[in-house]
Amino acid sequence: MQTASDELLQFTRQRAGVLAELGACACAALALWAIAGRLDGAQPEAHASFLAVAALFGAGLVRLVVQLVPVLSFRCPRCDHLFHADGARPAVRLSACAHCGLTASRSETSGA
């Protein structure tokens, strides 16, 4: 059986991976947008390459969403509510549980 600190440690690792991929996807989206503006008058090979890279970006984006769902639906081990969201308030908390305030930082979970 997994303890609460093990769950939080696994959650912290998942969240860090998702945030890294989110940053990479944002950079890739900006690069694709910048390149798309320069394709007018380019060779057909450049258009084909752009479409291939755009398709790979789409696949990466789908992978990101698949990894994001467990992070957003993680339930706090202390209060058993959704960790990031509180239905009573529109705000989303990223560093601590939105209900009980339990933090999931690496320093606290690795020492537990």
Image (cartoon, rainbow, N blue to C red):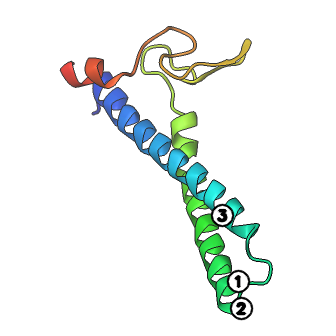
Question: Residue shown at 51%/37% (left/top)?
Answer: 71
What amino acid is labelled 1 in the image? His
Q: How many marks?
A: 3
Real-space Cα separation, disc 3 to disc 2, in angstroms: 17 Å
User: Are the residues at dot 1 and dot 2 in contact (C-beta closer than 8 Å)?
Assistant: yes
**Closer to us: 77 or 103:** 103
Question: Residue shown at 73%/12% (left/top)?
Answer: 88
Question: Residue shown at 65%/64% (left/top)?
Answer: 32
Q: Residue furthest right?
A: 40
What amino acid is labelled 2 in the image? Pro
Q: Earlier in the sequence, mark 1 or mark 3?
A: 3
Residue occupied by mark 1: 47
Element assignment for label 2: helix
Looking at the image, can residue 3 be seen?
Answer: no
Could you tell me which quadrant the N terminus lies in? top left
| Snapshot quadrant of residue 29 | bottom right
What amino acid is labelled 3 in the image? Leu
Q: Which mark is residue 44?
A: 2
Residue 14 at x, y = what percent?
41, 41
Element assignment for label 3: helix
Question: Residue shown at 58%/44% (left/top)?
Answer: 69
Dot 1 alpha-carbon crowd within 10 angstroms: few under 14, some 14 to 19, many 20 or more: some
Position of 45 compared to 18: left or right?
A: right
Residue occupied by mark 3: 32
Real-space Cα separation, disc 1 to disc 2, in angstroms: 5 Å
Looking at the image, can residue 80 be seen?
Answer: yes
| Snapshot quadrant of residue 109 | top left
Rendered view: 75 above or below 64: above
Dot 2 alpha-carbon crowd within 10 angstroms: few under 14, some 14 to 19, many 20 or more: few
Q: Residue furthest top?
A: 100
Real-space Cα separation, disc 1 to disc 3, in angstroms: 12 Å
